[in-house]
Image (cartoon, helix red, strand yellow):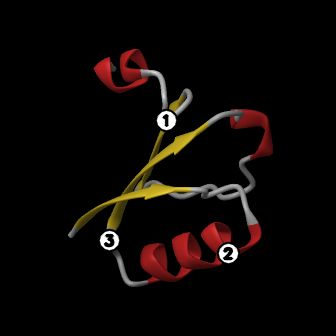
């Protein structure tokens, strides 16, 4: 399953992301700052940007 998540670098978002990845799902995460990301997983794709910036989704 492909899942889009926001808030991956936060406490709750991080826990949810880890659980979803453990189950083998693919995650696309929109985060504001890639430097805050501590999760490394081949099923995790990251887009850096702001949710209010529609251009962040063009990648």
Q: Secondary structure at mark 3?
A: loop
In the picture as drawn, the residue positioned furthest to the front comes out as 52
Which label number is shown at residue 29? none
On screen, 58 above or below 34? Answer: above
Tell me, yes or no, whether the two marked residues, 1 and 3, touch with CB atoms within 8 Å: no
**N-term-proximal mark, 1 vs 3:** 3
Q: Residue at x 62, y 55 (%)?
A: 40
Disc 1/disc 2 C-alpha distance (Å): 18 Å
**Circle 1 crowding by C-alpha within 10 Å: few under 14, some 14–19, many from 20:** few
Residue indicated by mark 2: 12
Q: Secondary structure at mark 1?
A: loop
Q: Residue at x 60, y 56 (%)?
A: 7
1 or 2: mark nearer the eye: 1
Q: Quadrant of residue 10?
A: bottom right
**N-term-proximal mark, 1 vs 2:** 2
Which label number is shown at residue 25? 3
**N-term-proximal mark, 3 vs 2:** 2
Residue indicated by mark 1: 51
Q: Secondary structure at mark 2?
A: helix
């Amino acid at each position: 399953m492909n899942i889009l998540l926001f808030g991956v670098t936060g406490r709750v978002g991080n826990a949810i992301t880890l659980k979803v990845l453990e189950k083998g799902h693919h995650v696309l995460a929109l985060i504001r700052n890639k430097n805050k990301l501590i999760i490394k997983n081949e099923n995790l794709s990251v887009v850096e940007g702001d949710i209010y910036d529609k251009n962040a989704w063009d990648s």
